[in-house]
Amino acid sequence: MKIAFFDSGIGGLSVLHHALKILPNEDFIFFADEDNVPYGTKTREQVLGYVEEAFKFLIAQDVGAIVVACNTATSAAVRAMRQKYSLPIVGMEPAIKRALDLFPNKKFLVTATEITIKGEKLFALIDRLNAQNFAELKSLSPLVEFAERMEFNSAAVENYLRGEFAPYDFKNFSSVVLGCTHFNYFKDTMKKILPPHIKFLDGNAGTLNYLIKLANLKIDTESKKIPHVEYFYSGRRVTSEKELARLEKYLRRLDDMYLI
């Protein structure tokens, strides 16, 4: 099956990166909307328009399923896309349930972009899981732009995160939920700043597990097959050696972040 992974930028590569490890027998398209990144600072109406254009393009590529590997786009547009298209569409969900399951009755910090933090979808999830007394919410939207510049552990990134985390007494927290796929690139910098007991949780595995169930796929962690991936920036196929090398650098960094 040809599966599309869609994101505002390169954050969704973290979801594709996991798919490459467990679904090597599938073909993949990765669509980064580089013309309009970041989504987190846009209006919900703008994001919905961007997602509609991306879906039109991806449907024309004859994909069998679409993973919206972007929490912001999921919050703003997945419901509308499911009403419009019949193929399997899988969105992202912050790993709040996982935080509750792993650390019962412990507080955790949900980090995401502004749209996700303020979105009805996140509050509905918190209510559904009865997590109101444990989840604290924090927007870290500038991390998206840092990631797009491949600036992961500079002094500017570290100072920004120290300032944003300063109000929290992390002795009382179990984990940080990474509610934006761009945030996976910063696990090492966050680890440097935060106490050693803090765990980092994302929704990548849960998203792919749902895709596997919905599209009737089979996990294969033994295969030596190298999956075929086509990359697109806002509908333009990526063919230049420079850009393909850039994407490969992101994937190699994700190899390092995978174990944190």
Image (cartoon, grey):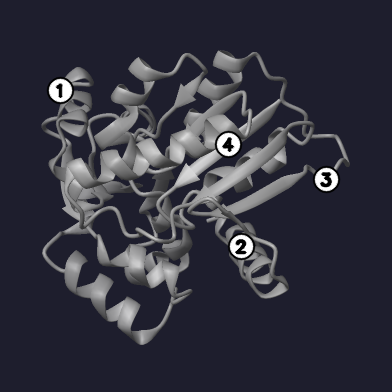
Asked if 247 appears above or below 202 in the picture, the reply is below
Residue behind mark 1: 127
Q: State which mark lies toward you, 1 or 3.
A: 3
In the picture provided, is 89 more to the left or to the right than 39?
right
Q: Earlier in the sequence, mark 2 or mark 4?
A: 4
Q: Amino acid at mark 2?
A: Asp
Q: Earlier in the sequence, mark 4 or mark 1?
A: 4
Q: State which mark lies toward you, 2 or 4.
A: 4
Mark sitting on residue 4: 4
Q: Amino acid at mark 3?
A: Ile
Question: Residue 47 in the image: x percent, y percent?
Answer: 27, 45
Q: Tell me if residue 208 can be seen.
A: no
Q: State which mark lies toward you, 4 or 1.
A: 4
Residue behind mark 2: 256
Asked if 234 appears above or below 249 in the picture, the reply is above
The residue located at (51%, 39%) in the rendering is 57
Question: Residue 4 in the image: x percent, y percent?
Answer: 58, 36
Quadrant of the frame with the N terminus: top right
Q: Earlier in the sequence, mark 2 or mark 3?
A: 3
User: Label 3 near label 4: C-beta < 8 Å?
Assistant: no
Residue at the far bottom: name it: 155
Q: Amino acid at mark 1?
A: Asp
Q: Earlier in the sequence, mark 1 or mark 2?
A: 1
Q: State which mark lies toward you, 2 or 3.
A: 3
Question: Residue 206 in the image: x percent, y percent?
Answer: 48, 29
User: Label 4 near label 2: C-beta < 8 Å?
Assistant: no
Query: Picture quarter containing residue 119?
Result: top left
Asked if 235 appears above or below 151 in the picture, the reply is above
Q: Earlier in the sequence, mark 4 or mark 3?
A: 4
Q: Amino acid at mark 4?
A: Ala
Q: Secondary structure at mark 3?
A: loop
Residue behind mark 3: 226
